[in-house]
Image (spheres, rainbow, N blue to C red):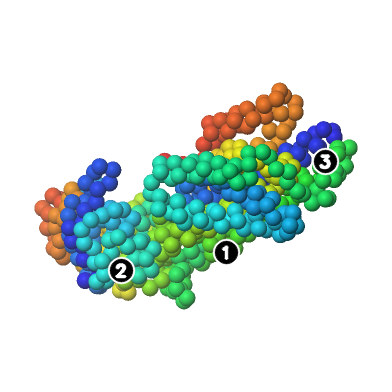
Amino acid sequence: MSTVVLLALTGLGLAALYFLIASGLSLVFGLAGVLNFAHGLFLSVGAYAAWTVSESWGLAPAVLLGIAVAAATGALVELVLIRPLYTRHTEQVLVTVGLSLAGVALLQSVWGADARVFPRPAWASSVVSIAGAQVPADRFLLIGAAVLVLLGLLAFLRFTRYGLVIRAGVENRDMVSALGIDVRNAFTLVFTIGGALAGLAGILAGMYFSSISPGQGASLLIFAFIVVVIGGLGSVTGAFAAAVAVGLLQQFVNYYGTAGAGDVSVVALLAAVLLLRPAGLAGKAAPA
Amino acid sequence: MILKINDLSVRLGGSHILQGVAFDVAETGVTALLGRNGVGKTTTLRAVLGEVPATGEVLFDGRPALGRATHRLVRDGLGYVPEDRCVFAGLTVAENLRLAVRVPSPDFDLVFDLFPELRQRAGQRAGTLSGGQQQMVAIARVLLNPNRLLLVDEPTKGLAPAVVTAVAAVLERVATRVPILLVEQNLAVVRRLATDAVVLEAGRTAWRGRAADLLSDADATRSLLGVGTTAGRH
C-alpha cells in the first residue's frame, strides 16, 4: 500500500510538471497553430534565471524573476521570430527547432554543461508520512502549483475578455478576426502565458530533480508534447487529465516493469489515443 | 457606391479562382452576388475582407481595402456573416454575442427584437443550436455594431423553408439600415430582397444590373444560373 501511495504521489508530481509545460504549449498550438519546439527553452531560461539570483536574492524573489524572464522570452520569441511566419508553417517549425538547439548551446556556454544543484524551500526537503509511505514534501508543492495554475487558467479563460478571444480563436481564429478583433495580440498573450508557466515548470523541475541542466527543458518537452496530443490541442482540462494519466502510467510501469518501460508505455498510450480518439481526450472533432 | 471592385483576381493553390471581377455595391439596398457553384462568389467576399490574397482594386467607403488587415476593415464597418455560420460551438450564445461587441453601446435591443429566442438561449452552447438558430447568432453578431456594409454569404443554405422565410424577413429589415452584398442560391430570396444583381461565371463578372431585369429574363437565368426563373417563384 505504501509503495502505491508513494508511486501515485510521485507520478502526480511528475504530472504536475508535464501539465505546467503542456498547458501553455497546448494553448499556443490551439490558438496560433504554432508547433513550438522552443517551448523547452522557456523552461530552461526561467530555471537558470531563478538559479542565478537565488543565492543573493532569496528563493521567492528568484522564482518570480524566473517566471518573469521566461514570460518575457515567450513574448519576445512570438513578436520577433514567430509573428512574421504565421502563414509559413515549415519555416515556423525550422525556426523553433533552431532556437531550441541554439538556446541549449547558449545556456551551456554561459553556465556550463554540468547540472547545477537547485535550491528548494527547507520544508520541501522534508518527508510526509501518508498511509505508511514516506513522501517527499516537494511532490505536494508541484501538485499544489499545478492545481492552482489549472484553476487560474480556467478562470482566466472563462471570465476575461482575452480568455473569451482565446477560446474562440482555438475554434476558428479567422472568424475572430472577422469580428474585428486583432487576434495577433492574443497570440502574443498565449506565448507570454506559456512562457511564464514553462518558467514555473523549470523552477519546480529544479526542485523536483534537485538540479537543472541546459537540456532539461528539451527532455521534458517530449512528454509535454505527448500530453498535449493526448489531451486534445487547445484544451487546458484535457492537458491536465492527460498529464495525470501520463505521469501515473510512467511511474507505475517504471517501478513494476523493466527500466525504461514507463516511457514505452506512454508512447503506447499515445498510439492508442490517436487510434481511438484522434482529436484527443477533450479535442474538437476533425472537420469532415 | 459603398464598395467598388475592379479587376479583382485571386489565385489559390495554383487555381486562378477570380480573373478580373468588377462590380459596384450601392449605398442602399441589397446587391445579390449570384452564379453557379464554384464560380468564386465566396472567394470574392473573402478577398474583399482580406482573408485571401488578392490583386486588383477594392474601394470600401472610398478607401483601398486590399492589403488591409481583416480586423481593421471590420472595425471600419464591414460586417461579415460567413457561409455555414461559423458560430463558436464551444461558447454559449451570450459569449458569441459578447465576443462580437466592439462599441461601447452595442445594439442588443435590435438583436433581441429580431431574435427574441436568443435571449432565452443565452446560456446554451452555440454548437447545440439548430441551423436556423445558429444563423440567428451569426447575423446578430454583426448587428450589435454599426456597419457601413454587410457581406452575407448564403444565409439560407441548409435551412428549413419556414426558417428561410424568417431569415429573409430579418435581412429585409436589416437592409433598411445598412446595404448588403448578398451571396444567395435561393432565387425566391433574391427576388424578395435584391435591388441589384451581379452574376459571376468562371471567375469573371458575366452580368450586372437590376435584379428584377435578370430574374424576369428566363434565358439569362437559365444560361447564367442554370435554373429557370419559375424555380424562384414560391
* Residue with the most extreme top position: A258
Which mark's residue is nearer the viewer, 1 or 2? Answer: 1
Dots 2 and 3 on the same chain? no
Residue A206 horizontal side relative to residue A227, left or right: right
Q: Which residue is mark 1?
A: A160
Q: CA distance from mark 2 to mark 3?
A: 65 Å
The amino acid type, in three-letter code, at marker 2 is Leu
Q: Which residue is mark 3?
A: A135
Q: Which residue is mark 2?
A: B149
* Residue at 15 percent of width and 61 percent of height: B208
The answer to whether residue B122 is visible is no
* Residue at 40 percent of width and 41 percent of height: A90
Element under disc 3:
strand
Which mark's residue is nearer the viewer, 2 or 3? Answer: 3
Q: On the image, which quarter does residue A59 sit in?
A: bottom right
Observer-nearest residue: A14 or A244?
A: A14
Observer-nearest residue: A209 or B65?
A: A209
Q: CA distance from mark 3 to mark 1?
A: 38 Å
Tell me the quadrant of the picture where the N terminus of chain B can be found.
Answer: bottom left
The amino acid type, in three-letter code, at marker 3 is Val
A43 is higher (above) or lower (below) than B156: above
Residue A280, horizontal then vertical, whole percent: 55, 40
* Residue at 54 percent of width and 53 percent of height: A74
* Residue at 23 percent of width and 63 percent of height: B58
Tell me the quadrant of the picture where the C terminus of chain B can be found.
Answer: bottom left
Image mark 2: chain: B
Observer-nearest residue: B34 or A70?
A: A70
